Image: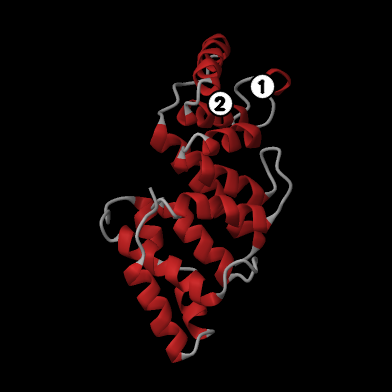
């Protein structure tokens, strides 16, 4: 996958993740500032989705960075407060080198893994994609295939959702690439790992 198309996929996931947790009203500077102040109070009390929404508003340029910082700061804060979408968006930020994060595939994988372990479908898929593209050493091809299989098993439950369709169709061929690098024994092991996988609480 080219760098440009990876970034396009990452951008799609960041929008899907943020919109999934809270619909953002149309831009209005006064209302955005008021909303951000309220979100900050909630985030400071441990509301992960509020931290995610601040990061999203910053990423869209709707609130002033000098006052609120960078999106990655808020995505990480939201992740610490157990927002799976915030963990995922932190991963996307590190993968793309945007939102105040330096490009770092290992960091991206760590944040994706945090969300994937708790059954967040986009993070499962992005982990498999990073492994298929040989961007990380923390996952071998067998683990990458496991995440692809788990993601596809989850995605068949929501065929009407465009993001689920991306995973089931796998037009970039991540699954085939991962399977092609494994022996038949390793493929069987990956399938067993996927079958045995259970989300973490």
Q: Is label 1 in a helix, a strand or a loop?
A: helix
Please give the label number shown on residue 193: none
Query: In which quadrant of the rendered image does the N terminus lie?
Result: bottom right
182 above or below 16? below
Query: As rendered, which of 68 and 43 lies closer to the eye?
Result: 43
The answer, for residue 174, to whether it is visible in the render is no
Q: Which residue is depicted at the point 47% across and 41% down?
A: 85
168 above or below 10? below
Cβ–Cβ below 8 Å for labels 2 and 1?
Answer: yes
- Packing grade of label 1 (10 A; few <14, some 14-19, many >=20) is some
148 above or below 94? below
Query: As rendered, which of 113 and 166 lies closer to the eye?
Result: 113
Residue 179 in picture, x, y percent from top left: 47, 81
Q: Which residue is depicted at the point 61% across and 53% down?
A: 108
Please give the label number shown on residue 68: 1
Picture quadrant of residue 195: bottom left
Q: Residue furthest front?
A: 201
Residue 44 in picture, x, y percent from top left: 55, 21
Picture quadrant of residue 154: bottom left
Picture quadrant of residue 65: top right
CA gap, disc 2 and disc 1: 8 Å
Give the colour scheme shown: secondary structure
Q: Which residue is mark 2?
A: 54
Query: As rendered, which of 74 and 118 lies closer to the eye?
Result: 118
The answer, for residue 42, to whether it is visible in the render is yes
187 above or below 47? below
């Amino acid at each position: 996958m080219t760098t440009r198309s990876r970034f396009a996929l990452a951008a799609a996931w960041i929008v899907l993740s943020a919109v999934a947790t809270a619909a953002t009203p149309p831009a209005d500077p006064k209302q955005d500032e008021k909303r951000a102040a309220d979100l900050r109070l909630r985030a400071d009390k441990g509301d992960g989705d509020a931290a995610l929404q601040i990061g999203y508003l910053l990423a869209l340029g709707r609130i002033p960075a000098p006052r609120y910082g960078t999106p990655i700061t808020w995505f990480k804060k939201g992740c610490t407060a157990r927002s799976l979408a915030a963990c995922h968006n932190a991963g996307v930020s590190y993968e793309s080198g945007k939102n105040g994060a330096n490009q770092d595939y290992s960091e991206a994988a760590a944040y994706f893994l945090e969300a994937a372990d708790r059954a967040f479908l986009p993070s499962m898929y992005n982990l498999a994609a990073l492994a298929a593209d040989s961007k990380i050493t923390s996952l071998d091809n067998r683990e990458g295939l496991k995440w692809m299989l788990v993601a596809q098993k989850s995605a068949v439950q929501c065929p009407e959702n465009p993001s689920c369709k991306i995973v089931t169709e796998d037009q970039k061929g991540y699954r085939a690439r991962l399977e092609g690098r494994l022996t038949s024994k390793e493929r069987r092991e990956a399938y067993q790992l996927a079958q045995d996988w259970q989300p973490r609480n």
